[in-house]
Image: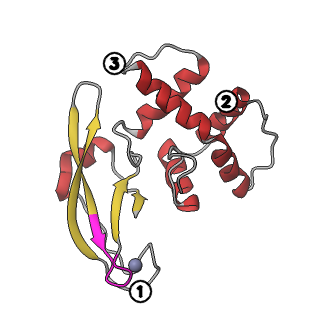
Amino acid sequence: MQILYDFKISMTKYIKLGIENHFPAFEVCPSCKAKVKLKRHGFYWRYIHLIKKAVKVPVCRYFCPSCCKTISLLPIFLLPYYQLPLRVIMKLIQCAASGKQVLLNLKRQHLQFIKKRFMNNLNWIEAFFRDKGYGGYIMQDKKEKAMKLMDLINTAATVETFSQRFHNHFLRAFMAQPNAN
Ligand SMILES: [Zn+2]
């Protein structure tokens, strides 16, 4: 199981600190909710593509002695299964939605993939805002809906906050494969 965790520091700092980051202790299992102390279970490393280079980022793992699940603590500036920082992904979606040129050395297919994935998650994202009490009108035309939802996402304190809240709410990422849960 993956959790999006707010380390309250910038991505740059997290990368710099690496395994010296402050990793929290858990007294309650986020998966089975048992009141047990989770055991630290090493790290795995993820590559993140920054503008000019790729860097390795540690992801801390925990083990629950109650449900025997492994829990990974993904920093909120990342998304499960994506190698680009969340902020970059959002920028790409925004550019794609408004027809602006993307000034990033990205393969066209990659950009199309990100855009398509976002478009395929519109109903999930709408459901999120509805569950959180948003009562305003949301157009059904896909393109207009995407723009509207993007506006709503931008009302969150940060895109990371939105991503984390979404993940906590549905236990899946807002950019996950729509039929996978
Ligand atoms: Zn557990």
Residue count near mark 3 (Cα–Cα under 10 Å), binned few <14, some 14–19, many ≥20: few
Q: CA distance from mark 2 to mark 1?
A: 42 Å
Residue depicted at x 33% and y 78%: 68
Q: Is residue 34 magenta?
A: no
Identify which residue, 136 or 30, lies in the foreground.
30
Identify which residue, 179 or 136, lies in the foreground.
179
Residue depicted at x 52% and y 60%: 171
The answer to whether the residues at label 1 and label 3 have Cβ atoms under 8 Å apart is: no
Q: CA distance from mark 3 to mark 2?
A: 24 Å
Q: Is residue 9 above or below residue 85?
A: below
| Residue with the mark numbered 3 | 105
Give residue 140's position: percent from left, percent from top. Answer: 78, 35
- What segment carries the magenta color? 61-68
Q: Quadrant of the N terminus?
A: bottom left
**Mark 1 residue's CB less than 8 Å from ligand 1:** no
Q: Residue furthest front?
A: 179
| Residue with the mark numbered 1 | 35
Residue depicted at x 21% and y 29%: 53
Q: Is residue 50 above or below residue 46?
A: above
Q: Is residue 73 above or below residue 30?
A: above
Quarter of the displayed picture in which ligand 1 can be seen: bottom left
Secondary structure of residue under mark 1: loop
Q: Main secondary structure of the magenta part?
A: loop
Q: Earlier in the sequence, mark 2 or mark 1?
A: 1
Give the residue type at disc 2.
Met
Please indicate whether residue 81 sits to the left or right of residue 171 in the image: left
| Residue with the mark numbered 2 | 147
Give the residue type at disc 1.
Lys
Q: CA distance from mark 1 to mark 3?
A: 47 Å
Give residue 107's position: percent from left, percent from top. Answer: 37, 20
The answer to whether the residues at label 2 and label 1 have Cβ atoms under 8 Å apart is: no
